[in-house]
Image (cartoon, helix red, strand yellow):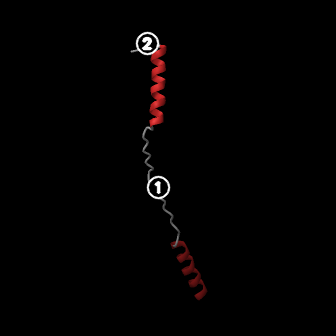
Amino acid sequence: MKQILFAACVAATLCACTPTIRVEVAPINIYAKLDADVRVRLDKEVQSAIAKNPDLF
């Protein structure tokens, strides 16, 4: 009888202790700023577009 009671207590204990894993992921913020090199390339592209189409603006 003691063995059955012990087995029941062990079974109840094992069922009550289930592991829980929680993972929280924070959002990633990316801040980009234009570099001077990007501005120069855009200026050159605009100048070439205006040179090809003088009536554009």
Q: Earlier in the sequence, mark 1 or mark 2?
A: 1
Asked if labels 2 and 1 touch by Cβ distance under 8 angstroms, the answer is no
Nearer the observer: mark 1 or 2; the answer is 2
Amino acid identity at mark 2 = Pro
The amino acid at mark 1 is Val
Element type at mark 2: loop
In the displayed structure, 32 sits above or below 50; it is: below
Residue at the spot x=48%, y=35% of the render? 37
The numbered mark at residue 41 is none
Q: Quadrant of the N terminus?
A: bottom right
- Choose between 34 and 47: the one closer to the eye: 47
Q: Dot 2: few (<14), some (14–19), or many (≥20) neighbours within 10 Å?
A: few
Compared with 28, 41 (above or below) is above
Q: Answer whether residue 1 is visible to the viewer in this image.
A: no
Horizontal and vertical percent for residue 45?
Answer: 48, 24
Q: Name which residue lies at 55% across and 75% down.
A: 14
Marks 1 and 2, how far apart at CA? 52 Å
Q: Residue furthest bottom?
A: 2
Q: Residue furthest top?
A: 55
Point out residue 33 in the picture as x, y percentages from the top left corner: 42, 40
Residue 2 percent coordinates (x, y): 58, 88
Pointer 1 local density, CA inside 10 Å: few below 14, some 14–19, many at least 20: few
Query: Can residue 43 be spotted in the picture?
Result: yes
Q: Which mark is residue 54?
A: 2
Q: Which residue is mark 1?
A: 25
Q: Nearer the viewer, residue 4 or 43?
A: 43
Depth check: give the residue in front, 11 or 5: 11
SS at mark 1 in the image: loop
Q: Identify the residue at horizontal 47%, vertical 55% (top origin).
A: 25
Vertical relation: 51 (above or below) 13:
above
Percent of width and height locating residue 57 = 38, 15
